[in-house]
Amino acid sequence: MQPEFYSLRSQFGMYCEYNELSFPLRITVTAYSDNNISVEKTVILNGENPNNEEYNFVLKDKSFLLEVWCDAVSILPDKLYAKIQTTTGETEIQQDCEYATIKGKITDFDGKPFPASVQFFRYGFSYPHRMGVWSDSEGNYSVTVPKGRYNAIFVDDDSYRKSTLENWCWNMIIDCDETLDFKVGTGEIYSLTPWFSNGGMPVMFLYFRPMILGYKREYKMRINSSEYNIIDIAPQLEPKDIKVTANNKDLQIISLQTIYETCDGMAMPAYILQVEKPRYSAEKQRVTVEYCTDAEGYTAASQGRCQFYFKDSFGTLIK
């Protein structure tokens, strides 16, 4: 059930921004459960990114990310305490812990159970900063994670790139217990991002870069005044291939336009999808996109989702 590509491991994670920092740096993190110490770890850092089996430290532009491996605890801590000591002084931080339980079922696009891992990627410098759980043999899973914003949720097993691609969720706001059911197929919806035409038409735009298993073309193309090497692994989608829902309500698709995501002389096809604007609500918005297509002899199906609050993600006019 649990192939080597994702092995569960318990850890503390700390992200810190600073104005000045001197080394050596001594960090002690203590986890409390009912005022009793459940775990305590101390690391001494010298400013280098180590190859260390006990912790991972990444330093970037007046911020750092620290992951410290530890034994699993039987009771989730209700409070974290951190002491950061340098040659010039020390700082103490105390954080109350709040959790949410995310559960659901993983299937393929035929509705059959698809046992897989569900991995939560916190905001940080790199994907290894993650936590998660494996489903059971029927695709059912349940995991309790710290509340907060998560860059992404990844769902798949070791069939990735062999017979499946991932289910991705983006900008996930874990602030309450929630049921999330996932479908895994032969396509992928990468980097799903919503935004609105404030002051313009009452519409929502969705950017995403799709992928399809087994399809790849490479060619050159001029975009604006520069030439790019195009890596095309995207299915040829039409509006009829796509379904968009917001809070389980179908949204009308208005248009689908191809663009190119460019970087360092390379570009990949992507789409901007224009749909009707969800009705304003103070509740969390849950947007899901699915596509199923059989273009150019390649069958692809994928699901992706994203979340936002109107009040803090957009300066949206209420209409």
Image: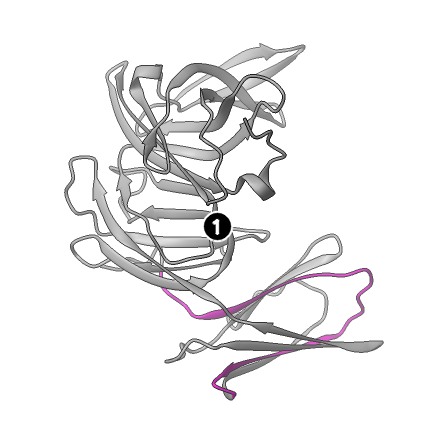
Secondary structure under the numbered disc 1 in the rendered image: strand
Q: Position of residue 263 (x, y in %)?
A: 61, 28
Residue that numbered label 1 is attached to: 173
Location of residue 139 with respect to 306 vertically, above or below: below
From which residue to which does the magenta span run? 7-35
Location of residue 108 with respect to 263 vertically, above or below: below
Instruction: Say whether residue 219 is left or right of residue 95.
Output: left
Amino acid, disc 1: Ile
Q: Position of residue 262 (x, y in %)?
A: 58, 24
Q: Residue at x 63, y 28 (%)?
A: 264
Q: Is residue 31 magenta?
A: yes
Location of residue 204 with respect to 309 vertically, above or below: above
Q: Residue at x 32, y 48 (%)?
A: 180
Camera-nearest residue between 307 and 229 = 307
User: Is residue 86 visible to us here?
Assistant: no
Q: Position of residue 45 (x, y in %)?
A: 68, 72
Quarter location, residue 261: top right
User: Is residue 254 visible to us here?
Assistant: yes
